[in-house]
Image (spheres, rainbow, N blue to C red):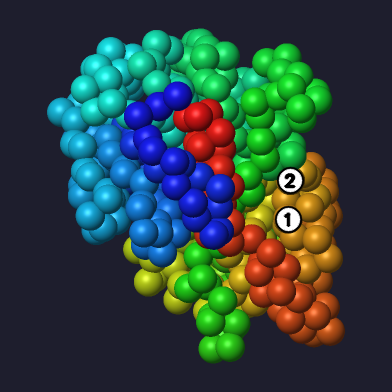
Amino acid sequence: MGWGRPRHVCELPLIEMRIGVNALYLLPGRVGGTEIYLRNLLVALADIEAASASPNQYFVFTNRETGPDLVPKHANFTWMPQPVRAAFRPARLLWEQTLLPLAAARLHLDVMLNPGFTAPLVSPCPQVTVFHDLQHKRHPEYFRWFDLPFWNFFLYWSARVSQGLLADSEATAADLRRFYRLPESPHKSKLRVVHLGVDPGFFPIAARRRPDPFLLTVSTLHPHKNLASLLRAFAEFRATHPEFRLVVCGFHGFVSGPLHELRESLALGDTVEFPGWIPRENLLDLYARAWAFVYPSLFEGFGLPVLEALAAGVPLACSSIEPIATIAGDAALLFDPHDARALAGAMVRITDDTELRERLAAAGPGRASHFSWRATAAATLEALAKVAI
């Protein structure tokens, strides 16, 4: 039993808790969807707690790169800045394994939420750790050789020592059971699937869209995003659609250099843009103006950009892999991302087929409405309460 006192909430059967949030992993603008996840989760948690007469207390541990803007400005949220840089991963992991548990003990935390894959291996309180994917097990070839040992060791043991595990999707949950030999039975497992949500700010875009002739992809520039195939398919597409451009926005990752070189070799220098990580207002504007959204990823733990495109009413063509296919349902044109001809053909259809475009644009917001950050936060709170008792 933790230090919290029982309470009764009409929405959730919770106890009053002192909750730590381990945000030491966060590098603003450099960790892609896991940053979007944490920022929206904290906002949704604050909204839920605002309706409570006796809210939980949150202590958000951040690094030198992350400012106070991450932490909701509510009395029950406390910013706990730590003098460590996440950019130097060994130092961050050492801090997480030693000084973070000491801070948790001093604060008498009831439970620690680890939203970025790794957890202290020795902790004074129960822990819930979020696994967004197990790419390092499914596709180790996408990792640098000196990074892979960290991923293998710390993720495995984080899964072992945590009293609760959250997976973004059924696909990630299946990987956790397979690679970490977790129990299949939900009655015996500490694993729970908690889907991600979509920012409500994307839904109004559908009513004000004014499409321009460009295709949009929102993605970090990492190998599994299949962006080299996207560029080659776009070069083929432009042979019949010379007025179109391609905008690929997201953090410049491991394959940024090769992708820029490929762009030049395909004579796409004036028609393909890599603007990097952009402010939210600029991103919303791109969704409002894009002719269509194309997402050719080979592997995903969830696929937040797909959900954002659906909410914004942008005609969407995306990979037929899981969990993307399930998230999109019948509101997207699916294609095999391993088939270059299928990718190029999907670009043509999503651009030229007026009836298809209208149907997908109309279906997208309805499909996206099934996913909310409030539901994500509520399920996360239930998981925290379960292990804190």
Amino acid type, mark 2: Pro
Quarter residue 43 falls in: bottom left
Please give the count of numbered marks on the rendered protein. Answer: 2
Q: Is residue 181 visible?
A: yes
Q: Is residue 142 visible?
A: no
- Residue type, mark 1 in image: Ile
Residue 203, image x and y in percent?
56, 76
Q: Name the residue beneath numbered marker 2.
A: 323
Rendered residue at 21%/43% (across/down): 79
Residue 175 tag number? none
Q: Position of residue 58 (x, y in %)?
A: 32, 43
- How many other residues sit within 10 Å of disc 1, few (<14), some (14-19) or many (≥20)? many
**Which one is nearer the viewer's eye here, 177 or 218?**
177
- What residue is pinned by disc 1? 327
Q: Along the line of sight, which residue is nearer the eye, 357 or 366?
A: 366
Circles 2 and 1 in contact, beta carbons < 8 Å? yes
Disc 2 packing (10 Å; few <14; some 14–19; many ≥20): some
Relative placement, left or right, of 41 versus 216 is: left
Horizontal side of 333 relative to 57 (left or right) equals right
Look at 31% across and 44% down and name the residue there. Answer: 57
**157 to 84, vertically: above or below:** above
| Image spot of residue 262 (x, y percent) | 55, 45
Residue 168 lies in what quarter of the image?
A: top right
The answer to whether 322 appears left or right of 312 in the picture is: right
Q: State which quarter of the image contains the N terminus.
A: top left
